[in-house]
Image: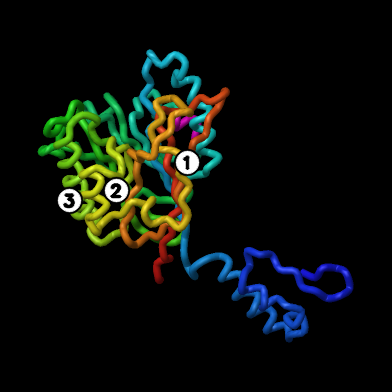
Amino acid sequence: MFNGSGGGQYLCPARWGPYCRLLSPCFFRLPMFKKVFLAALVLCALAGPLGAQTLKLATYNIRYDNKQDTANAWHKRLPYLAGLIKFQDFDLFGTQEVLRNQLQDLAGALPGYGHVGVGRDDGKEAGEYSAIFYKTAKFELLKQGTFWLSPTPAVVSKGWDAALPRICTWGQFRDRGTGFVFYFFNTHFDHIGVVARRESAKLILARVQALAGATPAILSGDFNVDQRDESYALINASGRLKDAYATAALVYAPNGTFNDFNSRAKSDARIDHIFLSPAFTVARYGILTDTYGGGKTPSDHYPVAIEARYARPKK
């Protein structure tokens, strides 16, 4: 733009960087077809890589509806938790510790989202879900399933030294706009069993390979271990999946991901993770430390949110 002083000085927004020279005063003396061409180049450059599509993804342990959580009761937290999700406008997100009544509450509070998953205690409605929510207008659900983190993953079971049954829910999705097909896996590792966490990591990697093969894949969850643990390293160094934190162009991580309903607690431990296959590039990674009511947190975990990009499939 010109400075309006009559001197003809050209002022350029700093974020446009080297593209500003295309919009110098000389630009306005070019023939119209050249103006259109150069303007199109600038817009493409500002928009990012040609053909790149963005997905807004998250993982969120919502804390099960524990009747002893009087100050942090589910009905008090729900409006803020759902409001955060709607404001962030996630395309898909994995959840953990979701009981049946909470699943119904979230479904009612989040119009436009579908979900997949089963209760871990019976493969139907009992126990906690590791449900995946997705925008039905944006994605077509092609396949879905759940397996248990145990030596007998096809049936309800508790694995190795785990204290509780643990599951991984997955869905195969197609982006309705681009035709891009990918898998989304979501899990919750055991909080006690060291062997169980290690073997769960190996099992999930094997199932990702068996189900997705070369198809792009995402794995989200509460892994109950931070970035320094062996089971985290098994996934992150697998060559199949990589932590979004490690590859993001922009990282916002003011705290760890577990807060225990105490927003003043500080940590660098990330126990909630999103891993992605190499088909994705991560533009932004954030741990969302929102509070309400003078410092209360919507859950005892902070959600992890990312923006991931993929190349638009060729037709």
Q: Is residue 135 visible?
A: no
| Secondary structure that dominates the magenta span | helix
Residue toward you, 162 or 178:
162
Q: Which residue is mark 3?
A: 206
Tell me residue 113's x, y (percent): 45, 40
Q: Which residue is mark 1?
A: 254
Q: How is the image coloured?
A: rainbow
Contact flag, marks 2 and 3 (Cβ < 8 Å): no
Q: Nearer the viewer, mark 3 or mark 1?
A: 1
Task: Name the amino acid type tagged 2.
Answer: Lys
Determine the CA span between mark 1 and mark 2.
37 Å
Q: Residues within 10 Å of mark 2 (few under 14, many from 20)?
A: few
Residue toward you, 112 or 279:
279
The magenta segment is 106-111
Mark positioned earlier in the residue sequence (3 or 1): 3
Q: Which residue is mark 2?
A: 143
Q: Residues within 10 Å of mark 1 (few under 14, many from 20)?
A: few
Tell me the quarter of the image containing the N terminus. bottom right
Tell me residue 209's x, y (percent): 20, 55
The residue that appears at 38% across and 33% down in the rendered structure is: 258
Task: Name the amino acid type tagged 3.
Answer: Ala
Task: Name the amino acid type tagged 1.
Answer: Pro
Q: Is residue 259 visible?
A: yes
